[in-house]
Amino acid sequence: MGTIQIYDAKRNGVLTLDRIEKSDAEWKRLLTEQQYQITTRKGTEAPGSCPFDEVHKPGVFRCVRCHTDLFRSSTKFESGTGWPSFYEPISPLNVIEQPDASLGMVRTEVLCARCGSHLGHVFDDGPPPTGKRYCMNGFALEFVREAKL
Ligand SMILES: [Zn+2]
């Protein structure tokens, strides 16, 4: 267990929170089959299958498992991939980036820092100002409008 520092958009500050650790079986019970396959079994949704690809309203995309703030919609861009894409996370505190050599490719996996949920991958072919493309699974996210934060 232990604690972790997480940026919170509503308070616009860093909070110290408990890490969220659950067994595979617990996540399977709490999530839809699609959410479970992506976040817990590191699956990938079919491109274009998630409605979030079209969402550009002011707000924040959160982790569907633990509700940690992950990306602002102001950093979302049209990547043409069919997956929600962002040029930066809401805070480097809130995500973990680690090497992923699965499927015969060397990629960088992106996970929720608080619960370890698999979110997607980050690539170096994104737009300014960062040049990064955070290619996310929409089913790993939930969207909250700015007014409801
Ligand atoms: Zn999470």
Image (tube, rainbow, N blue to C red):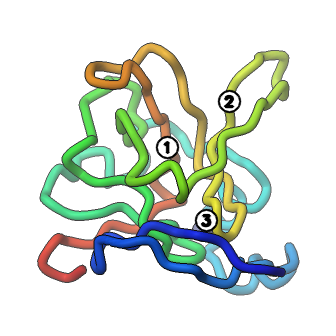
Q: Position of residue 5 (x, y in %)?
A: 58, 70
> Which residue lies at the image location 16% right of the left edge and 71% below the top edge?
146
Quarter of the image where the N terminus is located: bottom right
Q: Which residue is mark 1?
A: 136
Instruction: Name the mark on residue 35.
Output: 3
Mark nearest the camera among 2 and 1 is: 2
Q: Which residue is mark 2?
A: 108
Circle 3 — which element?
helix
> Which residue lies at the image location 43% right of the left edge and 25% below the top edge?
132
* Residue type indicated by callout 3: Gln
Q: Position of residue 18 (x, y in %)?
A: 68, 84
Q: Position of residue 71 (x, y in %)?
A: 37, 53
Distance from label 1 to label 3 (Cα)?
13 Å
Distance from label 2 to label 1 (Cα)?
12 Å
> Which residue lies at the image location 60% right of the left edge and 82% below the top edge?
17
Instruction: Name the mark on residue 60.
Output: none
Circle 1 — which element?
strand
* Residue type indicated by callout 2: Thr
Q: Is residue 149 left or right of residue 113?
A: left
Pointer 3: residues within 10 angstroms few (<14), some, or many (20+)?
many
Circle 2 — which element?
strand
Position above or below: 13 against 106: below
Q: Quadrant of residue 19?
A: bottom right
